[in-house]
Structure formats: C-alpha cells, structure tokens
Amino acid sequence: MGLFNKEKIQELYKLKVNFLKNYDKNNDGNVDLFEEDSFMNLLNKHQKGIIEIDKKYVLDFIKINEYLIEKRGNLNELLKSINGYNLKHLKYFKKSNIVSKYKELGGSVNSRVGLISQLKQNQGTQKSDLEELIDLFMLSIENYNLILFHSLNMITFLINDDMINFYKLYQMLDKLDIFNSNLEKKNFEKFNEISTKLSNLEFGINQMINKISIKEIISLINQTKKISKKEIYNYCIKLKNEK
C-alpha cells in the first residue's frame, strides 16, 4: 500500500467531478441516463398481443421490469457513494479486485467485451476506493443497458413470432434468476432444509433441556447434525427463557 500524494488527490478530484458531470448533471442523486419507462411503455403498447400469444409472458416481463428497477436502485446507491466520497479521509491504495466484487454483488459479467477486458487487466493493480467505485459503476451500468436492450428485443421477437431468438434471450435472462424459476427453487429448498433442521433441533432439545447441561446438549447434537454450536446454544437459551 502507498500513501496518496498531492498529485494523486488532485487527479481523483477531477475524476470525481467529471464522473458526476456525466452521470448526475442535475445533482439529484439519480443516474441521468435512464429511460426508465422505455420497457414498460413497450410492454403496455403490446400487452394485448402478448396476452393473445400467452398471458404468462406478461408476468415474465413484469419480473424483468422489477429486476431493472432493482438494478437502477443499485446504480443510484453507487452514485451516492461516489458523490459522497471524501478524499481527505482515505490515505492508502489497495489492490483492485473489481470483477470479483461485481460477481459477489450478483452482477452478470456478460457485458461489453472491451470494458470487461480492461477491468480484468487491472485486477491486482493498486487503486483508490474512488476508482474502484467508478469501475464498479461502469461495469454495472453496462450490464444494465445490455439487459434492457435484450429485454426490449424480447418483446419485439415475441410479437413478431420470432420464437427462436425470443427463447435465446429468455434462457440468458433466466440464468440471472430474473424469472425466479431457479432462485425460488434454491431458496425453497434451503428454507425446507433449515426448517427441518430446526424442527428436529427443537424436539431434541426439549427432551434434554431439563436433564443435562447446555454444554452437553451442544456436544451431543453437534456430533450428529450439521448445525453450528452457536445456533444450538442460542436456541437452548431461548427455550430456557420461555420456561
């Protein structure tokens, strides 16, 4: 890590100012480039025709719109972080790991090849937090615009009976869990697994709570079930307090 020098601070200040000029000209805290109603306008225009094909597609398109709204919100939060970035409070560089961060936030890396390649080349290089935030913003907005573009095309393909290209895009977006067919299944399975574990845990602890110590209960359950010691301890305390 290295300390920021005066020249670097001035460079970062200019970077921030230029960024805000491009993406928040009216200083209202929202990204300026969004045509927020473009997708819903097209959907409303063709709603009748979509229903005639299959009304279930209307729900799919509504889910796409909700996804886009969520991503716009994320971008606006990034914008606020960049706008509120105080150069005086940061003294050190750190290694850039922007692509990994983007994946952790649930972003797709199916954006434009040039930007992705450029960011990957910068992996491991020393950067400021401000540069990291701006890189993350740029990657996110490229991805948002790409999903919006494909979503608009999906409506057009469906209305024009181009089902091959429609389903190509549908499958691509489904991999991002936009339609929740994958995500809901995963979450439901996880919920069932947790519920089963807790039900078994409750029954077992209720049988033992007045007979042996909490430490012994934790030891016994932890040997046979993949449940954390902390979870068992907290549940024991909860049961004792309820008696």
Image (cartoon, rainbow, N blue to C red):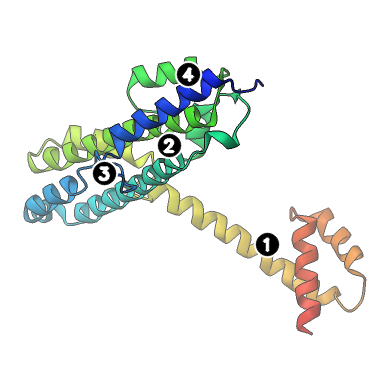
Across and down, in percent, residue 224 comes to 80, 55
Q: Nearer the viewer, residue 115 or 159?
A: 115
Query: Which comes before the other along the chain, label 1 or label 4?
Result: 4
Local secondary structure at mark 2: loop
Residue drawn at point x = 34 percent, y = 35 percent: 20
Quarter in which the N terminus is drawn: top right
User: Which of the 4 image quarters holds residue 194?
Assistant: bottom right
Q: Is residue 19 left or right of residue 50?
A: right
Query: Which comes before the other along the chain, label 3 or label 4?
Result: 3
Q: Nearer the viewer, residue 44 or 115?
A: 115
Residue drawn at point x = 75 percent, y = 69 percent: 235
The amino acid type found where label 1 is placed reads: Lys
How crowded is the residue under tag 4: few (<14 C-alpha within 10 Å), some, or many (20+)? some
Q: Is residue 193 left or right of residue 223?
A: left
Q: Nearer the viewer, residue 237 or 81?
A: 81
Q: Is residue 17 left or right of residue 48?
A: right
Asked whether disc 3 touches disc 2, contact meaning CB atoms under 8 Å apart, the reply is no
The residue pinned by badge 1 equals 197
Residue at mark 3 to residue at mark 1: CA–CA distance:
53 Å
How crowded is the residue under tag 2: few (<14 C-alpha within 10 Å), some, or many (20+)? some
The residue pinned by badge 4 equals 120
The residue pinned by badge 3 equals 26
Asked whether disc 3 touches disc 1, contact meaning CB atoms under 8 Å apart, the reply is no
Q: Nearer the viewer, mark 1 or mark 2?
A: 2
Local secondary structure at mark 1: helix
The residue pinned by badge 2 equals 107
User: Which of the 4 image quarters holds residue 196?
Assistant: bottom right
Query: Which comes before the other along the chain, label 3 or label 2?
Result: 3
